Amino acid sequence: MEADFSGYATKAGLKCSDGRTITRDAFAHQDKVKVPLVWQHAHNEPTNVLGHAILESREDGVYCYGYFNDSEQGKNAKTLVEHGDITALSIYANQLVEKAKAVLHGAIREVSLVLSGANPGALIDQVRLAHSDGEIETLDDEAIIYTGLTLEHSESAPEPTEEPAPVEPEPTQTEPVTEPEPVVQHADDETVQDVYDSLNDKQKDVVHYMIGTALEQAGNGSAAQHSDTITEGDLTHQEGNDNMSRNVFDGNGTKTEGPTLSHAQIKTIFDDAQKMGSFKESFLAHAEDYGITDIDMLFPDAKNVTTTPEFISRRMEWVAKVLDGAKHSPFSRIKSVHADITAEEARAKGYVKGNLKKDEVIKLLKRVTTPTTVYKKQKLDRDDIVDITDFDVVVWLKGEMRLMLEEELARAILIGDGREPDDDDKIDEEKIRPIAWDNEMYAHPVTVPANISPDGIIESVLRARKHYKGTGRPTFFTTDDILTDMILIKDKVGRRLYNTEAELAAALRVVEIVVVEVMEDTPDLLGVIVNMADYTIGADRGGQLAMFDDFDIDYNQQKYLLETRISGALTKAKSAVVIKRTSGTTVTPAVPAFDAESNTITVPNTAGVKYFDVTNPLDDTELAAGDLVITQTTDVEARPNAGYNFPHNTDADWTFAYTA
């Protein structure tokens, strides 16, 4: 039967665009093999199969004879070839074996008609698979090889033979073990020992020599500097990456001299592998016995599972709830004015003929909140920026700065930053007013017993709901512990009353329950009920969140500043309800007196308050009331006794400077 066309499927000696060359014998074993003939390597439909091709191994490459089938697509393709519209071929191959950028072995699986001129010269395209989850996987041992060679007129073809099973490469092209931990027990119960015993003496010598050569390289602690290893399917080699072990064979397949493991040693390793369940574990167990050092060279290095370092941070979901839920004003000076019409004088009155009609008295309440600056500053040595090449460290650092600044703003808005008033880093609570500690005109406080039960918390929230005058249905901000205690409440037969957070939220008459991890720092605060739409964040033009960077030429440092200038406050009366736990009698600590001339601290005698010398953080010493002469700069801290507590925002530590 005369072929419809013929031509070279691939040429030997052609250098591909990525620097690799197809060797003369790479596909020589496929002489007279019959493979499918397809269009543009498309496999998604059977109609893309146009016929078949018979391969012929020649001195200068692989020649093929093409036969079109009688399908419409086959007839159409035949017409295109006869007319000269299609003039180029390419092949799809797998089981590729490479040495020193030369493709030594492979198996042609199909020949394809391709658009003429689409890929001039030789080119190897890696095969990529798109999975259903969106991941793209590159198959390193498969490729589409374009040569740009033109078709010829039809010739008589040799008789085809059935395609043999995939031919393994000759010993001079031994494929390395690609699995780091081979499975000892196979599905058909064939063990590693069974496989080893099936080898002939020559094959066993090859295995012994390969392991011996690996041990030699590991033992002398050095790796060859030339990338001439035969590597199956390595089509992704990067220039400059020459840190590869050398080939265990010379160019013509003759073994080089070097240490080997004896048959008895090999058998011991395989026997122990069956017991341990892992060839790797068995190999490691005998490493010291056989004089192997630097064993890690034989196994892959650990790889990062993420492209950048992962932050160890608190839960941040609540931050967006606070910042995005608040109302944003284009003015940084916020003023709220309220008229109190709840007083008795504001009520409408009855009239008696002849009496004087009284005027209504309305009390106006006004509050002004001015802005403050909140910032985050970082710096990097330029040497570090240049040396860190695994990821963009500047982008990573700026992401950390924004993350932490937004958390600090949300914390200041909801519960305050927790720093004491004399701390230089304190966010002024008169500029960004925390809801949890706001004036009771705006945030109604509800005090509950210290030992209140989860049932009691729910009841307290529901009873306090009448004090809420805010917009719509609010959100309940609380801690994870409080949420867990409430959701685990059970009836008398052990059934949970609330199966989901949504059911609990409905029972509390709130839109949702939001867990705030930083609220755990204030254990007496059980929760805040508020609609963030009643909280206004103000920032003038230019005062919004902004990033600045500068280079310090003297210290070779790149410096970064992220800052904002804003104000914040509740602007609607009774728009929040704050649930607090009673922890005892509230007492304010007195400030110790200090005489700098005599270096004498006078410790006050305040009921419910103890004073401590905290100069040495590892040794707090309680101070007795009275005079104390210091011999060094001393830090003093006040702490409440059991049954007492300090008011919010209390300054309870002081530093007294010693004068020599």
Image (cartoon, rainbow, N blue to C red):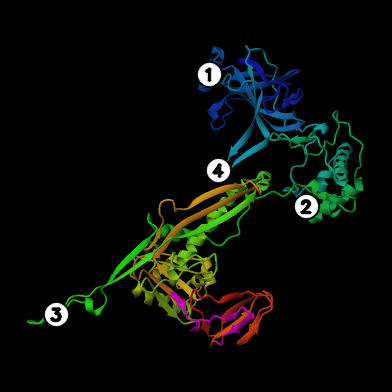
Structural distance between the alpha carbons of marks 1 and 4: 37 Å
Residue range of the region highlighted in magenta in the rendering = 579-605
> Which element is circle 3 on?
loop
Structural distance between the alpha carbons of marks 3 and 4: 76 Å
Pointer 1 or 3: first along the chain: 1
Q: Is residue 503 visible?
A: no
Q: Answer with left or right where residue 43 lies relative to residue 59.
A: left
Q: Nearer the viewer, residue 35 or 476?
A: 476
| Mark 4 burial class by Cα count in 10 Å: few <14, some 14-19, many 20+ | few
Pointer 2 or 1: first along the chain: 1
Pointer 1 or 4: first along the chain: 1
Task: Give the residue at x 54% y 33%.
Answer: 44
| Mark 3 burial class by Cα count in 10 Å: few <14, some 14-19, many 20+ | few
Q: Which residue reaches farthest front? A: 597
Location of mark 2 (residue): 278
Location of mark 1 (residue): 75
Q: Answer with left or right where residue 68 lies relative to residue 201.
A: left
Pointer 2 or 3: first along the chain: 2
Q: Amino acid at mark 4?
A: Gly
Q: Is residue 604 visible?
A: yes
Q: Quadrant of the C terminus?
A: bottom right
